[in-house]
Amino acid sequence: MASNQVWARRLRAAREAKGLSQKQLGIEAGLDPSVASTRINRYEMGVHRADQPITQKVAEVLNIPVAYLYADYDGLAELILTFERATAEQKAYLLEVAARIRAGSQ
């Protein structure tokens, strides 16, 4: 599982890419407006990590898969995002390539 620092870095990058402030993200994810900014800031600083329900809501707001936040390696995180944003045809192709790679490594 990704360390708090990796999780925090990915959260911040996704939030900034979406153009949301920490407070906006927190409010849209259902946090109380009076603590939204502070909570997201603590998540992004790696002080705390959100529990699964909040992580799910944050991912929905940011339009990213939850797995992106938890991926151990940056390359894997990028593959997760690529797969999530791909068309059905592209996903089928990516899965074919993955199957070929697995078959070749046996």
Image: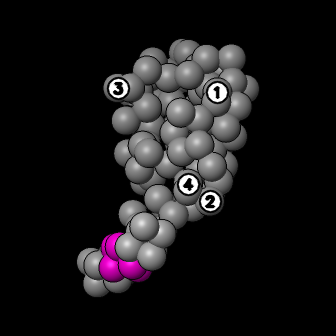
Label drawn at residue 77: 4
Where is residue 57? Give x, y as percent.
Answer: 37, 35
Alpha carbons under labels 2 and 4: distance apart = 5 Å
Label 1: how many Cα within 10 Å (few below 14, some 14–19, many 20+): some
| Sequence-wise first label, 4 or 1 | 1
Q: Amino acid at mark 1?
A: Asn
Residue at 37%, 35% (x, y): give it. 56
Contact? badges 2 and 4 (CB < 8 Å)? yes
According to the picture, the residue beneath numbered tag 2 turns out to be: 75
**Callout 2: SS:** helix
In the image, the segment drawn in magenta is: 94-100
Q: Residue 34's mark?
A: none
Q: Nearer the viewer, residue 88 or 56?
A: 88
Q: Is residue 105 above or below residue 16?
A: below
Which comes before the other along the chain, label 3 or label 4?
A: 3
First of labels 3, 1 by sequence position:
1
Q: Residues within 10 Å of mark 2 (few under 14, many from 20)?
A: few
Give the amino acid type for the residue marked by disc 2 in the picture: Gly
Q: CA–CA distance between discs 2 and 1?
A: 17 Å
Q: For the residues carrying marks 3 and 4, which lies nearer the camera in this image?
A: 4
Label 4, secondary structure: give it. Answer: helix
Q: Is residue 46 above or below residue 85?
A: above
**Amino acid found under the numbered disc labelled 3:** Pro
Which numbered tag is attached to residue 4?
1
Disc 4 residue type?
A: Ala
- Give the residue number, with chain letter if any, for mark 3: 53
Measure how far apart labels 3 and 4 are at the Cα level. 20 Å
**For discs 3 and 2, the disc positioned in front in the rendered view:** 2
Q: Is residue 75 magenta?
A: no
Of mark 2 and mark 1, the one earlier in the sequence is 1
Horizontal and vertical percent for residue 41? 67, 26
**Quarter-wise, where is residue 29 in the image?**
top left
